[in-house]
Structure formats: structure tokens, C-alpha cells
Image: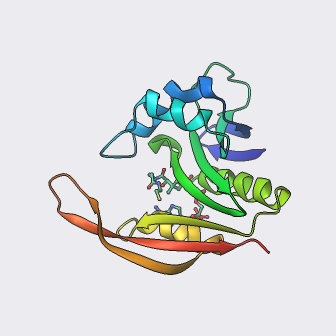
Amino acid sequence: MRTTFFPGRKREYAMEPLRPVDATALANLHQDGFARPWSDGEFAALLEQEPVFGFAAREVGRPKAPPSGFVLARLAAGEAEILMITVARAVRRSGIGWSLMDAVLRELHAQRAESLFLEVDETNHGAIALYRRLGFIQVGNRPGYYENPGAGRSGALVMRRDLR
Ligand SMILES: CC(C)(COP(=O)(O)OP(=O)(O)OC[C@H]1O[C@@H](n2cnc3c(N)ncnc32)[C@H](O)[C@@H]1OP(=O)(O)O)[C@@H](O)C(=O)NCCC(=O)NCCS
């Protein structure tokens, strides 16, 4: 459970496992954070895959409200990767991204995974700061990996967190 304080109101968030029925809510939230949004069909197909798992941050006491953030990950043969993480713009910087990543790390420890990888746009300084604080180190880069509509290309950093 994560507790955050917004002006005049305390909000608590629970990190709950994702299910295929969450696909539409994830697609709606994803539109808020990325230039090329994934469709609900793409999320549904991912959530049907056996090695894919994830968590949604849900505000406690508002069961019908859409999730405030989510993370999707895949684990195969001891190696895991983050496929996607996003937090609704209005509630960023209140600890939800950290709590989502923490939920993934706990699950991977329980599964005795060896390492967790991710790719992040080299210009995404907020996400890179979060990953560094969580113990990720840069292990590679992919020049020109991302195409940014109207803003050219940017590289990806490949980051890894050892779990053993
Ligand atoms: C990246 C993202 C998921 C972080 O989620 P968040 O809930 O805002 O992050 P948190 O509040 O848990 O931040 C935890 C720590 O990470 C670091 N951090 C997070 N966002 C930051 C920012 N914009 N600038 C600097 N540091 C940041 C800080 O150290 C922060 O701790 P602090 O607030 O006590 O200083 C969120 O900004 C987001 O959804 N961005 C758009 C989608 C995206 O870029 N996803 C990543 C793709 S690889």
C-alpha cells in the first residue's frame, strides 16, 4: 500500500495484479504518456501471454476509478524485462512509479529471477532517475532507437538490475 498526500486529501494506492479485462483502461492511460499509444487489443494480447505480468496502481476506496498507473513485465528463463510503465500525468511524482517497480521486483524475487532489463529513451531524465535510484545500471545503448514525431530520433539506454 502506498500513501501520498495531495492538497487537502490523503490518497492511498494499492498495487494489484493486472488481468486481461484491464486492457482498455491500460490503453486509455497509455495515451497520456506516449506519442504512439498502444491499442487495447495490443494490451489484451500481451496480458494473455503466460510470461507477461504486471500491476495497476488503484486508489483505495475508489473501486470504479481507472488505474492511476501500471507496469507490464515479462519473465522468461530467469531474465525479466519491463515492457511498459506509466503513471497518469496528474499524479506523477507522488511515489506511484516507485511502488509499481517495487511490486515487480518483489514478484521477481519470489520467482527467483536473476536480472531485470529495460530500455529507456536517453532524453527521459525522470524515468532514468527513477531507475538509477532503484539500482539499475546502464549496460548498453541503441543509437537512434526511438522515433519522436516532429522531433527526430533519440537513443535508448539499456539498463539492468541484478536480482541475486
Ligand atoms: C517515469 C514515471 C513512470 C515515474 O513515475 P512517478 O510516479 O512520477 O515516479 P515516482 O514519484 O515514484 O518517483 C520516484 C523517484 O524517481 C525519481 N523521479 C521520478 N520522476 C522524476 C522526474 N520527472 N525528474 C527527476 N526525478 C524523477 C525521483 O528520484 C523520485 O523521487 P522523489 O520524488 O522523492 O525525488 C512517470 O514519470 C511516467 O509515467 N512518465 C511517462 C511514461 C514514461 O516515461 N515511462 C517510462 C518509459 S521507459
Please indicate whether residue 92 sits to the left or right of residue 31 in the image: right
Residue at the spot 49% in from the left edge and 69% down from the top edge: 128
Q: What residue occupies the far left of the structure in this picture? A: 150
Q: Where 156 falls versus 25 (above or below)?
A: below
Q: Position of residue 3 (x, y in %)?
A: 73, 46
- Picture quarter with the N terminus: top right
Residue at the spot 22% in from the left edge and 65% down from the top edge: 153
Please indicate whether residue 9 sits to the left or right of residue 124 in the image: right
Residue at the spot 53% in from the left edge and 52% down from the top edge: 83
Q: Position of residue 152 (x, y in %)?
A: 17, 63
Along the viewing direction, whichever of 12 and 51 lies nearer the viewer: 51
Q: What residue occupies the far front of the structure in this picture? A: 77
Q: How is the image coloured?
A: rainbow
Q: Where 137 falls versus 83 (above or below)?
A: below
Q: Where 4 falls versus 138 (above or below)?
A: above
Counting labels gives: 0
Along the viewing direction, whichever of 49 and 101 lies nearer the viewer: 49
Q: Position of residue 124 (x, y in %)?
A: 39, 65
Q: Quadrant of residue 46?
A: top right
Along the viewing direction, whichever of 25 and 78 lies nearer the viewer: 78
Residue at the spot 66% in from the left edge and 30% down from the top edge: 19
- Picture quarter with the C terminus: bottom right
Along the viewing direction, whichever of 9 and 136 lies nearer the viewer: 136
Q: Position of residue 76 (x, y in %)?
A: 67, 56
